[in-house]
Amino acid sequence: MSPSVHTIEISCAAEVFLATALLHKEQPGRTEFTIQEIVNRAAKENITGELRSGVQVHASQHCVANKAPNPAKHKILFATGKHTRRLLQPGDEVHPGRTGKIFPDPGEVPEKHLPLLEWAKERYDKAVKVWNLGTPGPRKSDADHVDSPLPEAPRRHLEGLLSLRLAGAHLANDEDPDDYVRRLREGWE
């Protein structure tokens, strides 16, 4: 360990969060990163003075919201592919067993990284607002005052089918559905 490195107590989960958030902030045009890129960024940041083996397993499994808990229940990252990850976004499918944190507590983060934690929370909150409005992505006015583009609001599985619910209800005009179908079929042979 280098004598100029100041070491602190930090969980591997918080270290993975910081490395991934740094990648998102430094490369705003990218939507995902490989597990190796996250591990390399954690090594470059060198928060603990050494790269711990736990960082790799946290980036690949323990912090991944859409994987079964094994054993950690963090929901910091989202697996976009077998070897790619990004920070969790609103509307992402989360395994039901994942009940842990999305963000580390401020007390778990080195003081110099507190602005990064706040940036990530603001980014997430803005995406929540976009998601709640039902728009597929950021509007220009929302993105004008943000450091990097907002993540696109993810589409939920079968959302298109759910939007069709009751789409033709007005056609029956409060008529019993069976009577309506019988009336439509009159004259058919």
Image: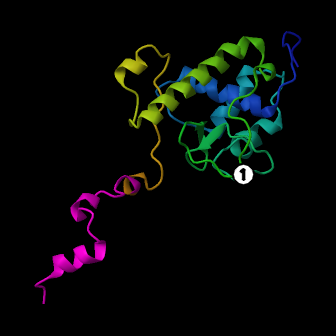
25 sits to left or right of 149: right
Q: Is residue 95 above or below residue 137?
A: below
Residue 172's x, y, as percent? 24, 65
Q: Quadrant of the N terminus?
A: top right
| Residue 126 in view (yes/no) | yes
Magenta segment boundaries in residue numbering: 162-189
Towards the viewer: 175 or 128? 175
Visible in this render: residue 152? no
Tell me which residue sits at (22%, 80%) in the image.
Answer: 182
- Image quadrant in which you'd find residue 171: bottom left
Residue on which disc 1 sits:
97
| SS at badge 1 | loop
Image vertical order of residue 116 relative to residue 24, above or below: above
Q: Is residue 177 magenta?
A: yes
Corner quadrant of residue 22: top right
Q: Around disc 1, counting alpha carbons within 10 Å, would you say few (fewer than 14), some (14 to 19), or many (20 or more)? A: some
Percent position (x, y) of residue 163? Answer: 37, 52
Where is residue 99 shown, x and y percent of the image? Answer: 72, 44
Query: Could you tell me which residue is drawn at 85 percent across and 9 percent down?
Result: 4
Quarter assignment of residue 115: top right
Q: Quadrant of the C terminus?
A: bottom left
Q: Residue furthest bottom?
A: 189
The amino acid sitting under disc 1 is Gly
Residue in the picture at 78% in, 16% down: 110
